[in-house]
Image (cartoon, rainbow, N blue to C red):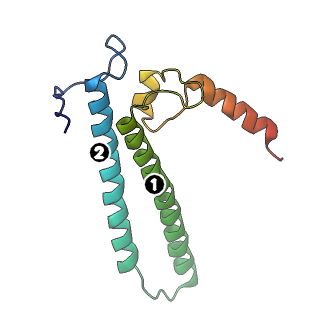
Amino acid sequence: MKQETFLPENYRPAEDEPFMNDRQIEWFRRELLRQKNELLNESKSTIAGLQDGTRNIPDVADRASEETDRALELRIRDRQRKLVSKIDGALRRIDEGEFGYCKETGEQISLKRLVARPTTTLSLEAQERHERREKVHRDD
């Protein structure tokens, strides 16, 4: 079993240290787990709210407004469910030693990009190429 890596309370990954060293890996693991737990807790509260919120509203406009709010809440939760899946993928890449490297080019993904979006799998350049191809091949 791997020994837990010590992280100072105010630690942030920095460019002047070796890329994906034990401290960086542990920081990203903790950050991803924190985000996942936050999303799962929000999801639980939404489910409870939707179950408690079922009621008969006589006014048609009020009922429509509430249904719109519920639909929006469900769309948000669906996006968050997909994000939890991406977080699980990032945690799996950490375990496999692939985290922080572009899946397309194998190059390092910048720390700045990883801190902003730890679930990313593409370097900025690869992401831009992907978006350009997507734009060209989109059916408008």
Which amino acid does the dot numbered 1 rest on? Gln
Residue 68 location in percent, x, y? 55, 70
- 7 left or right of 95 in image: left
Occupied quadrant, residue 29:
top left
Image disc number at residue 70: none
The image quadrant where one finds the N terminus is top left
Q: Nearer the viewer, residue 125 or 46?
A: 125
Residue 102 location in percent, x, y? 53, 28
Residue under label 2:
34
Image disc number at residue 80: 1
Q: Nearer the viewer, residue 33 or 2?
A: 2
| Mark 2 element type | helix
> Is 59 rendered above or below residue 123?
below
- Residue reaching furthest top? 16
Q: Residue at x 27, y 39 (%)?
A: 30
Label 1 vs label 2: CA separation?
14 Å
Q: Earlier in the sequence, mark 1 or mark 2?
A: 2
Which amino acid does the dot numbered 2 rest on? Arg
